[in-house]
Image (tube, coloured by chain):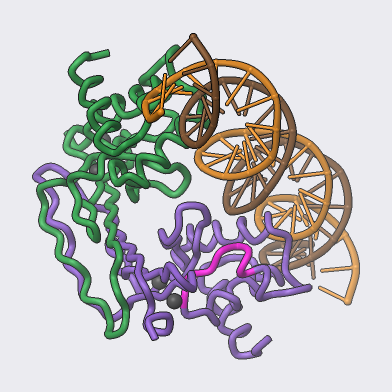
Chain colours: A green, B purple, C orange, D brown
Amino acid sequence: MNTTVKQHAVALLRQKRLRVTAPRVAVIAAILQSDSPLTQQQIAAQLGDQSPNKTTIYRTLLSLINADVVHRAFVQQRQWHFELAHHCSPIQCHPHFTCIRCHRTECLHDVSYPLVDLPKGMTMYRQQIRIEGICSACSA
Amino acid sequence: MNTTVKQHAVALLRQKRLRVTAPRVAVIAAILQSDSPLTQQQIAAQLGDQSPNKTTIYRTLLSLINADVVHRAFVQQRQWHFELAHHCSPIQCHPHFTCIRCHRTECLHDVSYPLVDLPKGMTMYRQQIRIEGICSACSA
DNA sequence: TCTCTATTTGCAACTGAGTTGCAAATAAAG
DNA sequence: CTTTATTTGCAACTCAGTTGCAAATAGAGA
Ligand SMILES: [Zn+2]
Ligand SMILES: [Zn+2]
Ligand SMILES: [Zn+2]
Ligand SMILES: [Zn+2]
């Protein structure tokens, strides 16, 4: 495990006044090192033998969501996907693209995506976009 | 149960060369009568005593999805929501708005929303949008 | 209308992501 | 070093959706 990433994780926890524990540092490090949203299973797999219990992973992710460090991405029906919240505005998260062949998900940080113009009376808290298709690697 | 709706359901099944059975007619009728996407539970609740077994409901919905009569709307993480597919283009489904207070979901058939401009090389099959917020009834 | 068969149904058991309760471990304040 | 509130791990649970299989049946053909 990369030392700098660990330090970054510890700093994040301190900043948010959360207790610095080994499981939390590991979970944050896994998320920091990924460029796409991860499920609990993927986090555990990445951490290997040293992975915390799945309950602990879920509870850690919940603390991080409450602290606005992490959020849940809108990717798949069955499993939650977690990623850093810092790229997104409070109401709009970047779109996610999932390839139906290789099943990989990519964050579309750089595409433009206007907010839907809601009917009168509704207030938007959050807008999420997901796209299914074939990625460039699988098109070849 | 409304006779006209039943006739409509039977006609749909005939048109798609699917066997006309009581469970299928009932499930389609429930969806035809709803203006928002329904879960298996909501379909069963609407049909009451005469509701088919939940396995049958899921299998019926699957047949209808394969026949392009119904599709799954991505509304909530936990449960599938099913609705008529006829309002949507093959690649873009209308957005869904879910109120975080009353937990009701509305279809936004009439708002406009452009397709995300995908990076070169990716091919779009389907784009879905979900919005969380406060509905007009709950804003009052 | 009757017969036959491929399709559909209902049930019970299963799967798998996520949650809960609780006792043991521990971060960090003093 | 002590103390205590917080966090962890485990096992048991929940609940949406799926699977296998025997019984029921739609509808084609006689
Ligand atoms: Zn791919
Ligand atoms: Zn993302
Ligand atoms: Zn509401
Ligand atoms: Zn809809």
| Residue A62 at x, y percent in the picture | 42, 42
Up/down of B138 relative to B128, above or below:
below
Segment colored magenta: B36-43
Indicate the quadrant of ligand 3 in the picture: bottom left
- Magenta-drawn stretch contains B37: yes
| Residue B52 at x, y percent in the picture | 72, 65
Residue closest to the eye, A53 or B47: A53
Residue closest to the eye, B11 or A136: A136
* Quadrant location of the N terminus of chain B in the rendered image: bottom right
| Residue D3 at x, y percent in the picture | 55, 24
The residue under the point 17% across, 33% down is: A140
The number of discs equals 0
Left/right of residue B117 with respect to residue D30 in the rendered view: left
Up/down of B77 relative to D21, above or below:
below
The residue under the point 30% across, 75% down is: A123
Q: Residue A22's quadrant in the figure? A: top left
Left/right of residue B8 with respect to residue A19 in the rendered view: right
Residue closest to the eye, C8 or D11: D11
- Magenta-drawn stretch contains B52: no
Up/down of B82 relative to A30, above or below:
below
Left/right of residue B20 with respect to residue B134 in the rendered view: right
| Residue A119 at x, y percent in the picture | 28, 82
The residue under the point 30% across, 65% down is: A125
Up/down of B54 relative to A36, above or below:
below
* Quadrant location of the C terminus of chain B in the rendered image: bottom left
The residue under the point 73% across, 74% down is: B48
